[in-house]
Image (tube, helix red, strand yellow):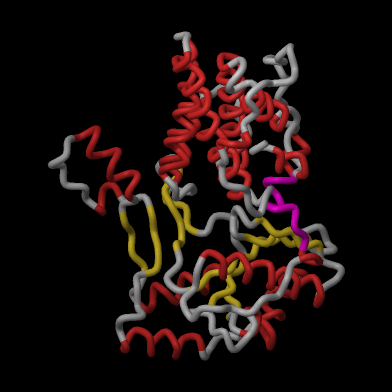
Amino acid sequence: MNFSYLKDLELPKGLYEACREAELFAKSFPAVSISSARRAGEFTVKLVYATLISNLDIYSKSAYEMLTELSFSGQIPESSWFDSAHMVRMSGNRASHQGAGMVQDALEILKALHYEVGYSLKLLHIANEYPAFDNRLVPETAGEPIPKSEIELELETNYLNALRSVGSIMSASTASRPQATKSKDSGANSKAALNSVAQFLHKQKPNWTVLVSAIKGTIAVTLPSGKSIIITVKSGCPSLGKRINGVLEILPGVSYVLYAPNFSPNQSFVEQLYVFSKDAFLAMWKKLGLIRTKVSKATSMRLRKELGPDTIISTEIYADMISVQSFSNSGKKTKLLAAELEKVPLLIKDGLSIIEKAEQ
């Protein structure tokens, strides 16, 4: 069956069972299948929202409201995920008619659910991969005469806290230290660099508690004194912040930034990262004149719907993101950045001493 891979994952209570029932009864009891798919899909939205946005309002907001906020947040790049999630969410309407077409509806919704769940678990680093949907794996008959259409779905606080705090439940002691494979940073490089730094810190400072949040792109360090600091890894022309509840927050919560203009395949990640305090990092980009604000695509689309397609979306009024301006196409700016980085210690040399000052 298409959802069998879920059995090997650590999941919230009931999610596998609901997905299994959606597949098991798609051809024999399509109404039950659609009902289970909708419950599993809405629960998946709740899981993603609670992890990426907040776990405080998951029981007071509808799936539609949570999907809307997730869309505006810009944290999920694939619009197809939203399409699938909305399709599954609205699937109850499809269960209102009877006949042979209802089986086809159940199969279409099942495929959408498979993508919604698989992509979500990969996004949250609960699963590394998920198999492609294969319609041939859907059973012709259930083999179980009584559907359990009211399977209990439960998002436990302990599970959610663990997921929010360490992303893939990966500690620094198990993170790998791969080499970069491209001179230009990618999402894969960023995650690998984050884990490589965490492993380095864990090895150099075994009395520190080091936890990786791949979702947030941060490393949370708890010092022996009980003090906590947040470290992030950046490269290229990174995003610096976004507008939340009307306030443009820049690197919220971050204490230290580890930065490389690009990653060379000839060195490990930790050999290429310069160590900044948050204030020093922002001051460097301000000095170079490379900080810029912009209006995100999601906000621009929303404003054009609300205000009309001909509306001029002013950056000064509507900017909801702040980032480093591209410098790679300017020899002058690249040289100026290189000159600034010469003044900053590398992590493997004197950079660790900057972070160690937090203990004092």
The residue nearer to you, when weighing 152 against 254, is 152
The magenta stretch spans which residues?
162-171
Q: Is residue 99 left or right of residue 330?
A: right
**Residue 114 placed where, x, y %?**
57, 37
Could you tell me residue 308's position as x and y percent?
Answer: 17, 35
The quadrant holding residue 143 is: top right
> In the image, 43: left or right of 328?
right
The image shows residue 359, relative to residue 33, as above or below, that is below
Location of residue 3 (image quadrant): top right
The C terminus, quarter of image: bottom right
Q: Is residue 240 left or right of residue 54?
A: left
Q: Position of residue 217 (x, y in %)?
A: 59, 59
Residue that sits furthest to the left in the current view: 310
Say if the magenta span includes residue 166: yes
Q: Which residue is drawn at the image coordinates 46% and 61% (left, top)?
A: 240
Residue occupying the point 63% across, 45% down = 121
Q: Is residue 36 magenta?
A: no
- Using the image, determine if residue 189 lies above or below residue 41: below
Viewer-side residue, 287 vs 208: 208
The image quarter containing residue 324 is bottom left
Horizontal side, residue 309 vs residue 341: left or right: left
Q: Quadrant of the N terminus?
A: top right
The residue that appears at 73% across and 38% down in the rendered structure is: 11
Horizontal and vertical percent position of residue 60? 57, 21
